[in-house]
Each structure stands twice: as structure tokens, then as C-alpha cells.
Image (tube, helix red, strand yellow):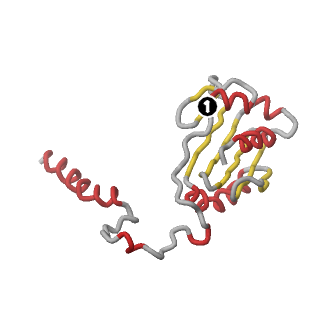
Amino acid sequence: MTVRRLIAPLWCSLLLIPLVACGPDDSGDADPAAGAGVEVDGDADLPNVSRPACPFSAAQVSDLVGQPMEDQGNCLFGDGKGVASLTITTASPLAGESTYDYQRKNATQVYREVKDVDKGRKAYLAVKDIEGEAVVVSDKGTYTVIMSSFQAISASPGGYEPTLRKVLDALPL
């Protein structure tokens, strides 16, 4: 009886693996011209570029934010005390274009101030007292930068905005 309970989920998962591995875009057509003429990115005219790697080392982030930062993996940098952090999430240009409007709208509900920035194809910068966020969609990729709990930055004139602008200027757009 116990063996049957283990076999049924295993069998079901084996049936689903081809669906997950192939995904919705793999129709299995052997003809490469079968999808010709289908515009994948609509009017966005985005290049077929994959997600970029993390653009900075801990030393570069330390220089940008003006205090020592440690690489904590996956483009997450912390102050080593569990307080201040800077995270950069990367995505393809198409993924960024697809979620940009939603992210910007959400930022207007979370942050005190949201400004459009002249970077890449689309960009905004959002700040509040203890946190800042910036999103840039460019031809080379999409970058979402989130900074939080930097005491010196929070207390400085302009707060997070000047530091986020320095980070955006250093991105490989």
C-alpha cells in the first residue's frame, strides 16, 4: 500500500516533465520557418538577448555606496552586519519590458517619490526614507536595483536618489 502511494506521484511527475522542459514556446515543429512572421516582442523592437550577469563586484558596490559591502551571492551585497543591503536583479530586455509598467505602478504605491530617468529604453527611480529602487530596461538587459537600510545614505541630503543615480550610471547599458 505504501509503495503505491509513492509510485503514483512519481508517475505523474514523469508525465509532467516533458511539459515543463519544453514549455509553452516549444511546439515541437521540425520546420524552422513554421514560426516565421510571428512577432514575439510586439512593437517593443527588443533584441533577442538573454539575462545579463551581475554587473558589479563587492568592491565596485562599496565604491558606489561609500561603505564596505560584502558579496552574499546572487548579486546581493550586504554590509556584513545584517543591516544595509543592495540587490540587483537582472532579466532579459523582453522580460523587463513586459513587467515595467506593473513595477512602476507598484512603486508609486510603495515609495514617497517616483521619477522617470533618462537611461536605456525605460527607467525610473523611486525613493523613501529608508529604501530606494531603480529599474532600467535597455537593449542589453533589465536591471532592478533595490537599496535599503543604509544609515549614512538615509541621513544624507537627497537620501537614496544620488546613490541610486551613481549605480545606474555604472550599469553596462
Crowd band around label 1 with a 10 angstrom C-alpha radius: few (<14), some (14–19), many (20+): some
Vertical comparison of 80 with 115: above or below: above
Residue 5 in percent (x, y) is at 18, 49
Question: What amino acid does circle 1 point to?
Answer: Ser
Residue 119 in percent (x, y) is at 73, 53
Left/right placement of residue 11 relative to residue 80 reads left
Among all residues in the image, which is located at the extreme right? 157
Residue depicted at x 65% and y 27%: 59
Task: Using the image as rendered, state which of residue 125 and residue 167 is in the foreground.
Answer: 167
Vertical comparison of 20 with 56: above or below: below
Residue 53 in percent (x, y) is at 55, 42
Vertical comparison of 48 with 153: above or below: below
Task: Using the image as rendered, state which of residue 142 and residue 13 is in the foreground.
Answer: 142
Quadrant location of residue 166? top right
Quadrant location of residue 171? top right
Among all residues in the image, which is located at the extreme bottom? 37
Residue depicted at x 79% and y 50%: 112
Left/right placement of residue 99 relative to residue 39 reads right
Task: Using the image as rendered, state which of residue 152 and residue 162 is in the foreground.
Answer: 162
Residue depicted at x 74% and y 43%: 169
Left/right placement of residue 159 relative to residue 80 reads right
Quadrant location of residue 160? top right
The residue singled out by tag 1 in the image is 57
Element marked by disc 1: loop
Residue depicted at x 51% and y 69%: 40
User: How many numbered callouts?
Assistant: 1
Residue 45 in percent (x, y) is at 60, 67
